[in-house]
Image: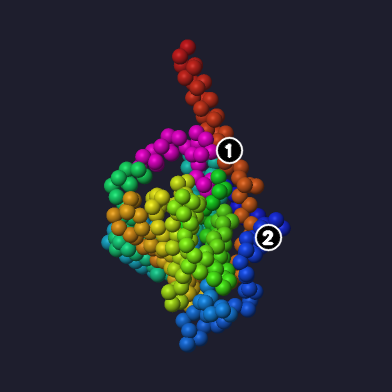
Amino acid sequence: MSHRGLLSCCARVSLLAVLSLVAWPVVSQARTALTDESTAPRTSWGDPDLQGVWSYASLTRLERPVELEGREFFTPEEAAERNAATSVDRPARPGDVGNYNALWFDRGRVDSDLRTSLIVDPPNGRLPLRSEAEERVAARREYRRIHPADSWLDRSAWDRCITYHGVPPISTGYNNTYQIVQAAGYVAIRVENIHDVRIIPLDGRPRLSERIRQWNGDSRGHWEGDTLVVETTNYSPATQHRFPSSLNTRAVERFTRVSDDLIDYQFTIEDPTVYTRAWTVVRPMPELRDYLIYEYACHEGNYAMTNILAGERAKERAATGAATAGGR
């Protein structure tokens, strides 16, 4: 897959063009220090200040592994062992051409709260899937096993450089950062992976019609004290979250700056057609003060798509040739 390249002039112009749709103030004027009277710094217009580059990289899995059933937390020693393992290269499987080495990946660490799953509700740390949803997931997995690349449409939106795996994000192997920028009445979130920008209005405007569906849905935000609450609906039929979802999926994210360099990030997923109840994730997001986000030049370096499709066509030709030879 692709990776970060140098930030091109065109990319700068594109991002600035998007951000210029709203009246962005100079960021440097907006930040104030934490004080005893305020639990969060404030922008010059009085909103809690969430601006910065924040990491959602995490070795903590979305669901609690079966072997950790009943255990809510790792011990510090277990967390240290898991963190150390990320620096070790894994040998390629037989017949595999290999992958990126450990130096390339940025999988993060076990979260500072030492939880064994990102899901905190239900308390068992597992997705509360309906039985029929489990069957759909299993059927989809089996189809992809048999038809990994009949066409480019069989590959994920991530493979195809369209977008990352939906909103809210789940940590992947690299580029797990959010850059938050604010203006009066708006919050913009720049997603490093596949270069998305979410522009979230805070002015109470009506939602888009249900007929209008988008890769990352339609988001509206508001403040509850020092917490930014963002509700997202109107996902596209083609949206591919890293958890089962549908057209009825509703996500509610909560961003609370709990210290100068840490955001408490939570999200809740509701979808009665997929889940028996709502479920909630909690994840600390530390600030990366010196981190620079470069252009995620995905299409320009996406040799994988061509090679995946070419490889499948070669396998088909080989299978046809073998069948023809066997019939003689």
**For residue 171, side relative to residue 9 (left or right):** left
For the residues labelled 1 and 2, say whether their Cβ atoms are less than 8 Å apart.
no
Label 1 vs label 2, nearer the camera: 2
User: What SS does tag 2 mark?
Assistant: helix
Rendered residue at 50%/42% (across/down): 155
Instruction: Say whether residue 151 is magenta.
Output: yes
In the image, residue 315 above or below residue 308: above
Residue 5 visible (yes or no)? yes
- Front position in the image: 236 or 205: 205
Q: Where 196 sits versus 141, above or below?
A: below
Q: Residue furthest top?
A: 328
| 270 inside magenta stretch | no
Dot 1: what SS? helix
Instruction: Tell me which residue sits at (54%, 71%) in the image.
Output: 185
- Categorize mark 1 by other alpha carbons within 10 Å: few (<14), some (14-19), many (20+): few
- Which stretch appears magenta? 138-159
Q: Amino acid at mark 2?
A: Arg
Q: Which mark is residue 264?
A: none
Spot occupied by residue 291 in the image (x, y as percentages of width and height): 60, 66
Q: Of label 1 and label 2, which has the lower sequence position?
A: 2
- Can residue 64 be seen in this snapshot? no
The residue singled out by tag 2 in the image is 12
Above or below, comparing residue 158 to residue 71 in the picture:
above
Pick whichever, 7 or 38, lies toward us: 38
Between 15 and 299, the one lying in front of the other is 15
Q: Percent x, y for residue 107? A: 50, 58
Q: In whole angstroms, how far apart are the C-alphas of marks 1 and 2?
A: 30 Å
Residue 79 placement: quadrant: bottom left
Pointer 1: what residue? Answer: 307
